[in-house]
Image: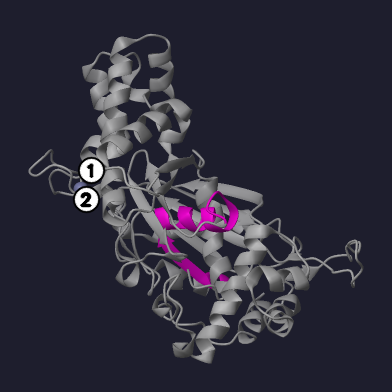
Amino acid sequence: MTDDADRLFEARPPSPLPDETAALPRRGRRRPALLSSTLVGSTNRRRVIEALFDHGPMSRAELARQAGVNRTTISGIVQPLIDQQLLVEGEAMPARAGGGKPGRPLRFSPDARPICGTLLMPGSVRSALVTLDGHILAEDEQSFATDLDVPGPIVEAITSAIVRAIAPARRAPLGIGVAVGGMVDTDLGTIVAVNLVPALNGLRLGSELEKRFSLPVLLDHHPRALLVGDRWFGKGRGIRDFAVVYTGEVLGGALYLDGHLQRGFAGAGGELGHTFVQVDGELCRCGRRGCWDTIATLSWLRAEARAAGLPDAERINSERLVGLAAAGNPGAGTLLDRYARNIAIGIANLQQTVAPNRFILHGDVVGGSDTMIGAILNHVRQLVPWRPRGEITFDAGETEDRAALRGAAGLVLSHLLQFPL
Ligand SMILES: [Zn+2]
């Protein structure tokens, strides 16, 4: 397995620096004379890979047109990917009216070695075997105690979930991506802090897994993995600006602006739940006061459902709340509107800060379907002043964790394709 993985990586030129493309002129401000040939190369490569993912299989000629590059450039970019068996050329398509040589469509190979995507949350770890086009072939889940003093048993649980998930594959996966429900140093592959599982703080999970599996391992913050999943396999395909917001037991978010995933230094940022919405407000589990987390998570909803005397308050979530409101429970209707408004406040702050305009929601609120999502959107629209071409739209992602598993796999895919997110 090591040999295969090594060969694949030796074939690659060095990865572009993360900030190389960040220095590109923004759309509409073309200054080609100032672009170095290396930069042009990585830009072309990016366009070709984006076109294949966003528009599906196409011939080299179509790809050249779509990506705005010439045929020679296309060959230089796709041939190494074909050699590495990441791309395949299909049967020739019938020639179009007017003649011309029939093209063979290029697509990401369904038979390529899959990727292992893993989601590490407090108390449980899920692992999946994911194909290059985002299909989940196998999955496993292991649980662990959150009050341990040492991380050893958790690393064993993670290893076991990965081993079981990748067992059905005949070949070693291309790499392992891990989405972590906590702060991550993405440069070092280290977990910085998981509030609810202190034993994980400071764990060098990346190097630990690399040692055990002899595969490349990439770690990132859970909401950023969701965004990467949406970008490659979901509703973010073909979109240059969007934000992902995750709600539920915790809150988190990630931003994709002008075609780039936003990460603070070494993966910092994205802690939307701990942005402040009320000076000296309620005490948050992070130890500070007035965080968005204190008014827009499921723990807030449960406490308010208890106070309002709603039935089964301990099991309340968006789906149940919408059901109760639809059944005419007056307390539920009021609480639904308050919960929607509290969630809207954090989203409105994000819109006011960088104006992504388009939001893909994941987690609990998706279970509340159009009723819950529409209520949040209405509040966001009321909180943010209207401006021309600034229409705010919402899309629903997935309630369950498969989006995060695909996203974790997407981290590896971006790395393999040398696609600097
Ligand atoms: Zn907090």
Where is mark 2, residue-wise?
275
Please give the label number shown on residue 292.
Answer: 1
Indicate yes or no: mark 1 CB to ligand 1 under 8 Å: yes
> Relative to residue 83, is residue 206 depicted above or below?
above
Which residue occupies the extreme left position in the image? 280
Which residues, given as a range, are shown in magenta? 212-237
| Rendered location of residue 405, percent (x, y) | 53, 52
Q: Is residue 217 magenta?
A: yes
Front-most of 153 and 94?
94
Front-most of 123 and 150?
123
Q: Left or right: 202 with respect to 391?
A: left
Specify the amino acid type for callout 2.
Thr
Q: Earlier in the sequence, mark 2 or mark 1?
A: 2
> Relative to residue 394, is residue 78 depicted above or below?
below
Seen at 43% across and 40% down, the residue is 363
The number of numbered badges drawn on the structure is: 2
> Relative to residue 315, is residue 389 depicted above or below?
below
> Relative to residue 319, is residue 155 depicted above or below?
below
Which residue occupies the extreme top position in the image? 328
Q: CA distance from mark 2 to mark 1?
A: 6 Å
In the rendered image, is residue 224 in sight?
A: yes
**Secondary structure category for the residue under label 2:** loop
| Rendered location of residue 400, percent (x, y) | 51, 40
Seen at 63% across and 82% down, the residue is 6
| Rendered location of residue 133, percent (x, y) | 67, 57
Specify the amino acid type for callout 1.
Trp
Indicate yes or no: mark 2 CB to ligand 1 under 8 Å: no
Seen at 40% across and 75% down, the residue is 22
